[in-house]
Image (spheres, grey):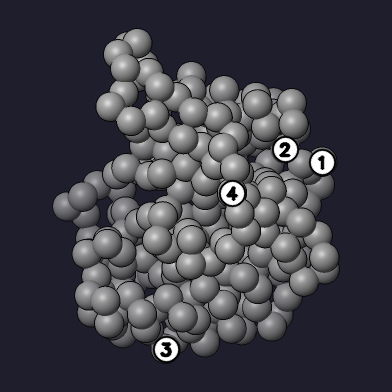
Amino acid sequence: MISNELIKKTFDYYDKFKDYDVVVSPSLPILYFGDLASYEKSDLKIVTVGKNPSDNEFRLKKNDSFSFVRFSNWENNTRNLTHTLNSYFEDKPLKQWFSCFEPILNGLSASYYRNNYPNIVLHTDICSPLATNPTWSKLTKGIQSDLYKEGLEIWKMLIEELQPDLILISIPRDIFQSIFKSTGKELINFSQKKDGELRRKPYVVEQYEYKLNSGKKVKVVFGQPANKPFGTICNQQKNEIGEMLCRK
């Protein structure tokens, strides 16, 4: 269950920044993506992490006007946020983006979707729950700073409430290292591409630890992004990551 305090903080943040030119309009704050009740029932609680939601969450095609097309349950007058977000993957999810994480999750007997996997996963965004246009990397440093300070606070509060067992994260290393301070270790590396050609530099997946206020130590797995999370390794290699984590 998400606390009323966190919902209020999220909407206060949304109301503060929604009129910025770079914030998608119309939009809503995407505190998380996925079925919270099924996540809470999962034996292995997994949260994936990106920077902030894509502007494509509010349109089906690049030239479409922004709308709530992927959030058909949204009611602006009641602000029924959790009800709307819980059904995201049953509506019109941005599958091409979430497919980046899905092979790793499947290796862990997990998925964003209600299918044959026993563990249901939530996705979160660590820099901001607001979709922007342009994308995060193209925002000015000033706007990034404005959105990030409170956006990170919201994410940390959310993670305290979700109490995950595992966090999978693929964001720029400088942002990652400013938040996750523990010493990392190599989990697995891939020296070859899908076609067997040697990489100029191995793709290294690293394992860290994140301590919650409850004292719980959460396993954190980091992989360098490209245009998308874990973007330069193939699905088979991603599946290997999940299977390796299952064995540990």
Q: Quadrant of residue 99?
A: top left
In screen coordinates, is 116 left or right of 66? Answer: right
Q: Earlier in the sequence, mark 1 or mark 2?
A: 1
Cβ atoms under marks 4 and 2 closer than 8 Å: no
**Which residue, given by chain and number where applicable, does mark 2 sit on?**
119
Q: Which residue is mark 3?
A: 16
CB atoms of marks 1 and 3 within 8 Å: no
Q: If you read the primary sequence from the N terminus, does the residue marked by circle 1 or circle 3 appear first?
A: 3
Residue 1 visible somewhere in the drawing? yes
Task: Classify 223 as above or below 192.
Answer: below
Three-letter code for the amino acid on which mark 3 is drawn:
Lys
* Numbered disc in front, either 1 or 4: 4
Q: Nearer the viewer, mark 4 or mark 2?
A: 4
Label 1, label 4: how far apart the Cα atoms are: 25 Å
Dot 2 or dot 3, earlier in sequence: 3
Q: CA distance from mark 1 to mark 3?
A: 37 Å
Work out how far the residue at label 1 is from the one at label 2, CA to CA, in angstroms: 7 Å
Image location (x, y in percent) of residue 6: 65, 78
Measure the C-alpha gap from mark 4 to mark 2.
26 Å
The residue carrying mark 1 is 43
Residue 213, percent across and down?
77, 71
Please name the residue shown 38% across and 55% down the image.
Answer: 172
* Nearer-the-camera pick, 189 or 75: 189
- Kindly identify the amino acid type of the residue bearing the numbered disc 4: Gly
Whether pointer 1 and pointer 2 mark residues with C-beta atoms closer than 8 Å, the reply is: yes
Which amino acid does the dot numbered 1 rest on?
Answer: Asp
In the picture of the structure, the residue carrying the numbered disc 4 is 184
User: Which secondary structure, mark 2?
Assistant: strand
Instruction: Identify the residue shown where x is 72% and y is 37%.
Output: 119
